[in-house]
Amino acid sequence: MATNGRPARTDAGSVSGRPLRADAERNRQRLIAAARQVFAERGLHVPMEDIARHAGVGVATLYRRFPTRAHLIAGAFEAKMCAYADAVAQALADPDPWAGFCGYIERVCAMQAEDRGFANVLTMTFPLHKCFEAERDRAFRGFAELVDRAKAAGELRQDFVGEDLAVLLMANAGVIAGTASAAPHTWRRFAAYMIQAFSAGNAAPLPPPPTPTAIYRALLHLYEAGIRDERCGG
Amino acid sequence: MATNGRPARTDAGSVSGRPLRADAERNRQRLIAAARQVFAERGLHVPMEDIARHAGVGVATLYRRFPTRAHLIAGAFEAKMCAYADAVAQALADPDPWAGFCGYIERVCAMQAEDRGFANVLTMTFPLHKCFEAERDRAFRGFAELVDRAKAAGELRQDFVGEDLAVLLMANAGVIAGTASAAPHTWRRFAAYMIQAFSAGNAAPLPPPPTPTAIYRALLHLYEAGIRDERCGG
DNA sequence: CTCTATCTGGAAGGTAGGTTCCGGTTAACT
DNA sequence: AGTTAACCGGAACCTACCTTCCAGATAGAG
């Protein structure tokens, strides 16, 4: 939950190096708060104007501070991305590797269910926002460690690979997009099914996993398709 | 594969009762063919004009024949919906209930992977197109029979419910939306994981499933959200 | 062949959202 | 308090797409 002690930003929030004037920084914070709430409730495709109105500022101010939607998304979800990575550390602290693994899967799926925007953010990569992607990498490295331990404990199937997490996130995003409003607990059952599938107990052979670079290209594709218009949800 | 002997349409294709003039009927067929191809390649959200151009007719002709996008979707996917229902019958013909069940899951996921539009159609309900929904019902009733037999054979977990199929379809739609272009075989691995999760072998307890009416509302929600604008991918 | 109901395509009108411009305002330094 | 660079918001502009309209073309009956 904590941001792991790292400073969230090196500057006061400006895109360039110079710190922002006080009122500008205040508006920037309002925009981020508004974006967090609106993205969480309605997804990443909401009109820019709605976010600006919700923040109580004009559209121009939004564009001045966040020149593209991707900038705004990165700004709004930076903290959650840290929490996502911190959750791995928490899972690694569990003395039982399998419990840690399962807890992490559930936690991540829950984060998707709580926030419609974040559900999609987790299935994209934002190549221009290095600080953002650094958190994802941190999460992924920790997850790889979690996977190794759970395999070593004999609880996780040996043919599980890290890329399977990305697939799970895409699948759960689909479940949530469909059921969030009408059957909001469905994701729990789905996550339980997936954990069941990941357990080592009489595991049947699987088709080969996607390569890491293929998965990266898939995340990139969702970014490109999802920022331009989306709606996707689909 | 076959349309099961039922007449695909009672009339020659008109919305009202009177049959269409020959050229109009020809254009209607062209539109359906164009819509099938374009929906399959690019999803349900493609501009109406692109479909008309691909069919070699004007936009007005498209609107004249299919007053809403939903009409066009229903027209374009009616045959595939029949195939979807026929696949159940085929699965029921398998002497091994578990093999029939697994084969059906794989077949359905494959149909989603082959056709980006159909992947989403299977996660929606079109309440105004009764003939279309009748096929879905036929598929669902057959699937319920398949489930009962697989449970009786002791291969399918007892807590599986028919609604889990809808959840699987939504999840697989999410996997395909993400990986179709960059890692096109990923759905196979995902489907294998799901089948593994459905098998009776040391099945851990699951959170409760959504009710049938909740799932119906979920499908309806995806219809409303997906036809108006979508793009969904989300 | 003639006539007419039916059909056609392009163009026009409407809406939603993204992005930029510009005259007025304000923080903050001296 | 005065000065200035930074900032603000709404309006204007632009694009993409949906939907309707209408003057001309055509199938098909008599």
Image (cartoon, coloured by chain):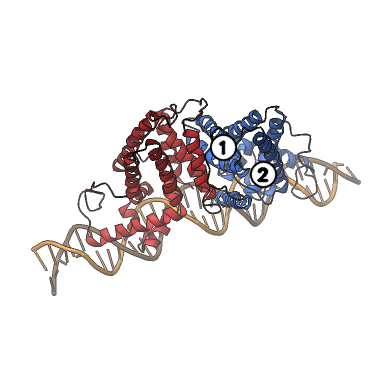
Chain colours: A blue, B red, C brown, D orange
In the image, taking residue B169 as reference, residue A66 lies left or right, namely: right
Secondary structure category for the residue under label 1: helix
Residue at 51% over, 48% down: B177
Q: Measure the C-alpha gap from mark 1 to mark 2.
A: 15 Å
Secondary structure category for the residue under label 2: helix
In the image, taking residue B74 as reference, residue B206 lies left or right, namely: right
Residue A162's image quarter? Answer: top right
Residue D16 in percent (x, y) is at: 50, 56
Do we see residue B67 in this rendering? no
The amino acid marked with disc number 2 is: Ala
User: Which of the numbered marks, if any, corresponds to residue A229?
Assistant: none
Mark 2 residue crowding within 10 angstroms, few (<14) / some (14–19) / many (20+): many
Front residue of B59/B139: it is B139
Q: Which residue is mark 2?
A: A74
Front residue of A136/B56: it is A136
The amino acid marked with disc number 1 is: Arg
In this rendering, is residue A35 above or below B177? Answer: above
- Labels 1, 2: one chain: yes
Q: Which residue is mark 1?
A: A116
Query: Disc 2 sits on a residue from what chain?
Result: A
Front residue of D25/A169: it is A169
